[in-house]
Amino acid sequence: MKLRSLLVLVLVFAFSASIRAAELNIEITRGVDNPIPVAIVPFAWEGGVALEEDVAQIIASNLEQVGEFRALSRANMLSMPSEEREVHYRDWRILAQQYLVVGKISRVPGGQMVQVQWEFFDINRERKVLGEVLTGSVSQLRDIAHEISDVVYREITGRRGAFATKIMYVSAEGNIGDMTYRLHYADYDGRRAQILLESSEPIMSPAWSPDGSQIAYVSFETDLPRIYIQDLATGQRRQVSNFSGINSSPVWSPDGRKLAMVLSKDGSPDVYVLDLATDQLTQITDHPRAETEPAWTLDSQYVLFTSDRTGQPQIYQADLSGGFPERLTFDCFYCAKAQFMPDGVNMVHVRRETRQDNTYSIAVLNMETGRVITLTDTALDESPSVAPNGRMIMYGTTYNGRGVLDAVSVDGRAKFRLPSPQGDVREPSWSPYLN
């Protein structure tokens, strides 16, 4: 057995290692009825040797892959302004653009830092909306591009962007009996992936703390499943479960005070809640059938879980103060792996409609109206994880015989596949906002 922990403080900003993979593949399946046209002009670079990161292209890709925008092709641009005095609004009106982003990058004298000066314009109103100057190292240009994307997204839609967030996921590579398991940490789009943990034994169920400072996961490094909590800044970790049988599926309550998990220490798998301040463990479900896959309501007062107590997996809700669990899904053959979206009304889950269709899809159930929207149409979709702004859902699926990660917009109109390492990739976990 081997285990390497690679978490260090520099994870916050330093991403020296990256996965070399195919370019991000964005597929706009239907697009919104009227995607917002936006022009992101290549940022001028005043430093000589070409930069590795194309800030403008990153911004354009970010905006396009949420399915709400259409970025203008550079080949169709009539001019390439880099600052306000070079902007001619008529050029962009001719091209039917509504918004424009321009910028330039220069070296900060006497050091290794660069300065990114960017401006955002409303073409129809012929006015500059805002401008900023951001400073960072060359290795932070992708972070700066994500930050700019978040600002532009919020200015146009009124909603907070999630481009500066991170993800975790698990990969498995090798042959049976000689597998290597890795826990990865990456940008939301899969870029700049780092290995947080590597082991010859399985790693499962990564989960973020609500403030993004810690992670929980299951490791079999002792040949038995155990739940660990690890600090992202220091790498320090502690074991929080050491019971006989199953120890799995850790998930933080939104208030950060508790950790729900699945234990089988008394027989069948049931949901428990651990108070992280007192280490008090409370059993939430008690049934001879399997009760698994806990998740929380936004008020931290209820736990969702999957149970096959009626013969097929369905989603239930249990009150932490007691009482009989309430069944939430009825009109599906298989409903599992539930998670509430940030609005507290819509619930994303894995769904199989009938015994005959044999297709497992990512779907959203509106708990007020009962309306179900099926977002994916591949056969084996699993482990959905929602962006903190509720606009995208990441999930595991299968492509060419191996596990990959896809993301889909909440209306199902746009999706993209993340670049990933070799082997099977599974169990994505989308971070909360980190700033």
Image: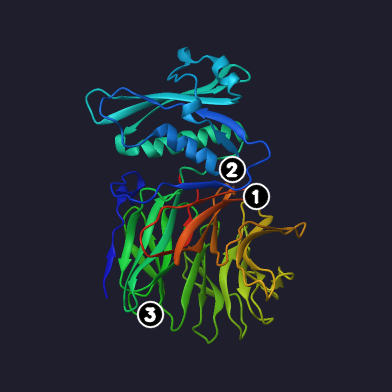
Q: Amino acid at mark 2?
A: Gly
Give x and y (percent) for residue 404.
46, 60
Q: Secondary structure at mark 3?
A: loop
Q: Quadrant of residue 6?
A: bottom left
**How many labels sit on residues?**
3
> Does label 2 or label 1 sit earlier along the sequence?
2
The Cα–Cα distance between marks 2 and 1, rounded to whole angstroms, is 9 Å
The answer to whether residue 36 is seen in the rendering is: yes
Q: Is residue 18 left or right of 86 when viewed as pictured? A: left
Residue 246: give its label.
Answer: none
User: Farthest left residue?
Assistant: 110
For residue 148, side relative to residue 364 (left or right)? left
Of circles 2 and 3, which is in front? 2
Q: 355 and 323: which one is in front? A: 355
Q: Earlier in the sequence, mark 2 or mark 3?
A: 2
Relative horizontal placement of residue 319, taking residue 19 as reference (left or right): right
Measuring from the top left, give residue 193's x and y in whole percent: 36, 52
Mark seen at residue 67: 2
- For label 1, the residue is 411
Can you tell which mark lies on residue 224? 3
Whether label 2 touches label 3, CB < 8 Å: no
Q: Nearer the viewer, residue 155 or 299?
A: 155
Task: Tell me the quadrant of the picture where the N terminus can be found.
Answer: bottom left
Q: Amino acid at mark 3?
A: Leu
* In the depicted structure, whether residue 348 falls above or below residue 105: below
- Front disc: 3 or 1: 1
Label 1 crowd bin: few (<14), some (14–19), many (20+), radius 10 Å: some
| Residue 424, placed above or below residue 194 | below
* Contact, mark 3 vs mark 1 (Cβ under 8 Å): no
The residue located at (45%, 83%) in the rendering is 245
Residues tagged 2 and 1 counted as in contact (Cβ below 8 A): yes
Q: Position of residue 373 (x, y in %)?
A: 69, 57
